[in-house]
Amino acid sequence: MKEKLLEAVIREMEIGVLVLDARKQILYMNPFFKSTFPVPQPVTQTPAGGQGNFSVGDIIRDPDLLGAIEETLLSPDHLPVKVTIQGRNGQVLEVRFLHFVEERAPGLIGFFHDLTEEKRVEAIKRDFVANVSHELRTPLASIKGYAETLLDGAMQDRETLRNFLSIIDKHANRMTALIDDLLTLSMLESHQMPLKLEAVEIRGLINGVIQGFEKNARDKGLKLTGEIQEGLPKVTADKVRLEQVIVNLVDNAIKYTNQGEVRVIARGENSHLRVDVEDTGIGIPDKDIPRIFERFYRVDKGRSREIGGTGLGLAIVKHIIQAHNGKIWVTSSPGKGTAFSFVIP
């Protein structure tokens, strides 16, 4: 029973397990290891999880890994050996080898920990800190520069004083918006922002957003329209947050469209509300689409900062939709336009 229990535990472990004898022949490997390395078909078909006359060199080609196996087997003090390697499809694996004695003969056990997700999260954290620092540094440098110029005597000129103060105010507002978005995103990600659910009439909500952006669209010569299916039932949602989603998507559509139109389409689809915000703007390259909802990710960094925004809007939108048990996606053709779509129950 102990053997069966141990076998079940090792088989279901979310780390790779490899057992070798002193001749580096494979005695055992669990399913996680087989899914991580390209195991030849004859090996996978041998009994007891892969036992048979197969050398580790039939499976592993990584020189660092093979070197760690050799070092473990030859180590006189039997100390564990660790090595970090690159697996298939960009995997990052931390491998630890230990000695064991089987029927008076030495062997070793290797444990393969997949650190890919952990490394990805670390990279995201580093990027996040770097991005926040960069986003704050620019307006702070401007505020400091204009304030120093005023203190050096420029404030005596009333026109220069008013101009500089308006620039300082603009940059202060930009920092305030960034901090507000950071706080909102943090609360959404940590589920500390409860939704205030109520019955929302989607026609009125969308029409209100469109009315709010009519002047922006008219100033750019764009046509802004709403196409809302007749008889749509009310949707249970947080009205303020749902409006925030549509406002953000319409605002982006207008900013990145120089001619043509922006349409907001709402309809029922399989017991869900579906909303599409379509434009005839500059579009998004295919390579950027998978990252479009990341924090601070910008397709055109120079133009994005020029037209404003904190770089957090789409990340906030994604989390609001997910908090409503919905999903959001984007389709785009560079030079032809973009459509952001979301569904919620």
Image (tube, helix red, strand yellow):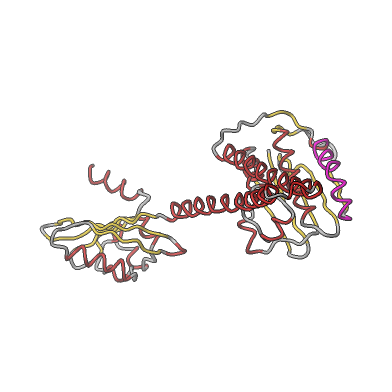
The x, y position of residue 48, in whole percent, is 28, 57
Chief SS of the magenta region: helix
Residue 40 percent coordinates (x, y): 36, 68
Please name whichever residue, 285 or 124, is drawn nearer the observer in this view of the structure.
124
In the picture, measured across the screen, residue 180 lies left or right of residue 336, that is left
| Residue 338 % position (x, y) | 75, 57
Q: Is residue 63 magenta?
A: no
In the current view of this chain or complex, which residue is farthest to the left?
104
The span picked out in magenta is 204-221
In this rendering, the answer to whether 25 lies above or below 273 is below
User: Which quarter of the figure has residue 222?
Assistant: bottom right
Identify the residue shown where x is 30% and y is 63%. 46
The x and y percentages for residue 224 are 86, 49
Which quarter of the rendering shows the C terminus? top right
Residue 95 horizontal side relative to residue 208, left or right: left
Q: Is residue 219 above or below residue 270?
A: below
Q: How many marks?
A: 0
**Viewer-nearest residue: 302 or 102:** 302
Identify the image quadrant of the N terminus.
Answer: top left
Q: Is residue 209 magenta?
A: yes
Please name whichever residue, 55 or 252, is drawn nearer the observer in this view of the structure. 252
Residue 243 or 179: which is nearer the viewer? Answer: 179
Q: Residue at x 37, y 55 (%)?
A: 32
| Residue at 40% in and 54% down | 115
From what the image shows, is residue 323 above or below residue 253? above
